[in-house]
Amino acid sequence: MKREEIPFYVYGFSDGEVGLFSRGMRQLQVIPVTTLTIRSWLGKPDVSVCAVRISSEEDLNLFRQLRVEYPMHSWGACVDPGHTSFLSQLLCREGFVLFLHPLEKESLSIAIQRLLGNIFKGRIQASVHRGLRVMHQSYRWKTDEIEVQAVAQLIAGQLEMGEFCFQGRDKDAAVLAIEEALINAVEHGNLELDSALKEQDIMGLAYEAEKTRRLLDKMYSARRVSIELSIDRDKAACTIMNEGPEFDFEAELDRADAVECLEKASGKGIFLIKRVFDRIIYSDGGKSVTLVKHKKPEVFL
């Protein structure tokens, strides 16, 4: 069965640059848009794909407005044409808008070719044609390199894109829950820090001192934290894996259900995670935890 051409909207490009898109892939129907017509395609229910070249403050202000007006689209920015991982993420969405900041002519050509290459690569190709909301990402950090808060913000941002949480307190709660899961993987998993140390020292000085010591010890710091994030239309699953020893996760889950855990210096992490995610699934002796969140059905009053 012959596939239809994908309408590929472009804004802010010269005729020659539009030609680069047109010649790059025959499956694309390249359609230049203007400030007057861009809203008409953004409101379409089918798959919308657009590349935007920002060349003035007016352009930038326009697309800041459009991001607010059309939150159902995924929005991304590209400054370095070598950054292709986020292109793959955006292209797995139902609709996306890509910002291409001012680039030299040679760099723009490279960016366009990489963009075209990502559009028609395996699963991404199917996603664009079928309009799927499917995404899978993998991350891996050494224990002494991972920035917990930044990673939590990144994962929560992807959940927000998939409409599993929303800007404000809902997203803040997701960030906090993911942070707690990452801290458990880093501190109690890879660094093997005992939470009892916190209970014995209210100020946490001994705990932090031991944490610092172990981060300098290659036996602990070289261990990895791995993350697998999968999102489809109805479910998001984030699996966080560490390389520390096994532990009694069932006891931890039971302890998280007790009200008393809120009064202690440690043990609140799983309690907070359970308030945000629908399921917590441990495997590999507790060294792997999967946080599952289902999309809530819309309620019409």
Image (cartoon, helix red, strand yellow):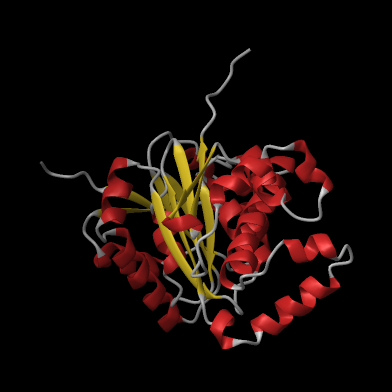
For residue 151, which quarter of the picture? bottom right
Q: Quadrant of residue 56?
A: bottom right
Q: Residue at x 60, y 78 (%)?
A: 145
Query: What percent of the width, then of the height, locates residue 16?
Result: 36, 70
Position of 131 relative to 96 (above/below): above
Vertical order, 52 against 17 (above or below): above
Q: Is residue 119 left or right of residue 202?
A: left
Q: Residue furthest top?
A: 301
Q: Position of residue 177 (x, y in %)?
A: 66, 50
Q: Quadrant of the N terminus?
A: top left
Residue shown at 89% from the left, 66% from the top: 203
Q: Position of residue 62 (x, y in %)?
A: 64, 53
Task: Pick the residue in front: 257 or 159.
Answer: 257
Most foreground residue, 154 or 142: 142
Direction from residue 209 to residue 155 in the image, left or right: left
Q: Is residue 280 something that shows in the picture?
A: yes
Give left or right: position of 234 versus 154.
left
Q: Is residue 35 visible?
A: no
Instruction: State the image coordinates of residue 112 (x, y, percent, origin top left).
Output: 37, 70
| 262 over 301 or under it: above or below | below
* Residue at left offset 54%, top offset 73%: 79
Residue at point 84% right, 46% down?
Answer: 263
